[in-house]
Image: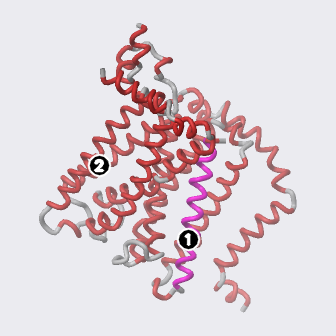
Amino acid sequence: MLGSILSQYARTLSVFAVLLLIVLIEALGVREAVYPGLLPFFTWMRESSWLGVIGTTYGSVYATVEAVHLLSMAVLGGTVLATDLRLLGVIFKDIPSETLVTGTHKCFRWALLVAILTGIFCAAGVGDKVYYMQVFWIKMLVLLLGSCYMLFIKQPFLTSRPHAEINPWMIRLLAITSMLTWFTVAATGRWIGFS
Amino acid sequence: MINELLLQFGQWMEAQQYSQMLVAGYYSYSWLEATHVLTLMVSIGSLFIIDFRMLGLVMPNVPASTIAARLHKPMIIGFVIMFITGALLVYAKPVETIQSLWFRMKMILLFLAFINAWVFNNRMKGAEGNWDNDPVAPKPLRTGAIASLVLWCGVVILGRYIPYDWVDCTNTTNTTILWAAGCVDQLNAL
């Protein structure tokens, strides 16, 4: 009985569980306890890991990987905008939104993978600098939440049933949340460069 | 001759009050740069989706021309914002930018990318047959899409190189690089 009720709200409960976890991490002081212990890892990334050594030794390699990071974010943003603007009814009105949601997702996942891999390289090159940046940690948190949101909530929900059966406001909410999330990831990423 | 004229133009811009205001205000320059980079998601993001569709990598079940037509408007809006912010970034640091080898190479690639876009657009309009619904576009369009991807990747990479000073006028004595970057004073001093 309880199991069947819970299974109906699995996604909602998952979201609340993640939010509760974040609140608990903050309230119980886990973040303050873990944070100092991460500094040696970030220092090692920059000074000893081969990613950090390449990034700090060869400026042109670092700049090229930065550019690939930007390009992957551009592709990621393009797929997010195309899908979400369709869900909001702004563009692609003559194409079923289901087609956009499924058709761009593979491209999104590849772009996300490349963005994460190149992002790790970029962070390794300035490891002990980004460690002290609040904006870097905000980006990491939003990136984690955004990836989970896309892969475990938005995409499964939008591919589970025809969009005509979903409340239009729910679809709009999903699209706006997605656009705001990825805009925040991109904007905070840009701000790391200025900090 | 052209390098001297460009340098004079840059020095004239640098003497302008608004140019100095843009570069002196930390946040104004940062906001401009951030807008320029973030708009990549709209302009190049849309363009790459069109190119990927021509290569059959995204939405092969949707007519290629429909994707190109529907993404045209957001893409153009993105490019217009990029050009305005890009021009203002040059206006803020005119001499430094005009004498950047990477900036000059970026402008050449931008020019080639626009020629390619124009040719691509004409080829798409002129393409005969029922290719629009094919998962992969005909070879001439695929070639144009690959050229577009390569050129725009080059534009972004060279744009990313601009802030780095590896081949700045003061960091090299190679006469070819000094000439290509338009380092008039350094060339005269040699």
SS at mark 2 in the image: helix
Kindly identify the residue that appears in the image at 79 percent across and 66 percent down. A23
User: Which residue is more in the foreground, B107 or A82?
Assistant: B107
Is residue B58 magenta-colored? no
Residue corresponding to mark 2: B146
Query: Would residue B134 be visible to someone looking at this image?
Result: yes
**Image quadrant of residue B86?**
top left
Which-is-in-front pick, marks 1 and 2?
1
Q: Amino acid at mark 2?
A: Ile
Relative to B152, is B60 above or below? below
Question: Mark 1 near mark 2, Cβ–Cβ under 8 Å?
Answer: no
Q: Amino acid at mark 1?
A: Ile
User: Which residue is more in the foreground, A97 or A147?
Assistant: A97
SS at mark 1 in the image: helix
For the stretch drawn in magenta, the main secondary structure is helix
Pointer 1: residues within 10 angstroms few (<14), some, or many (20+)? Answer: some
Kindly identify the residue that appears in the image at 71 percent across and 39 percent down. A42
Q: Which quadrant of the figure contains the N terminus of chain A?
A: bottom right
Q: Position of residue A140 (x, y in %)?
A: 66, 53
Pointer 2: residues within 10 angstroms few (<14), some, or many (20+)? Answer: some
Residue corresponding to mark 1: A176
Kindly identify the residue that appears in the image at 37 percent across and 14 percent down. B175
Q: Which quadrant of the figure contains the C terminus of chain A?
A: top right
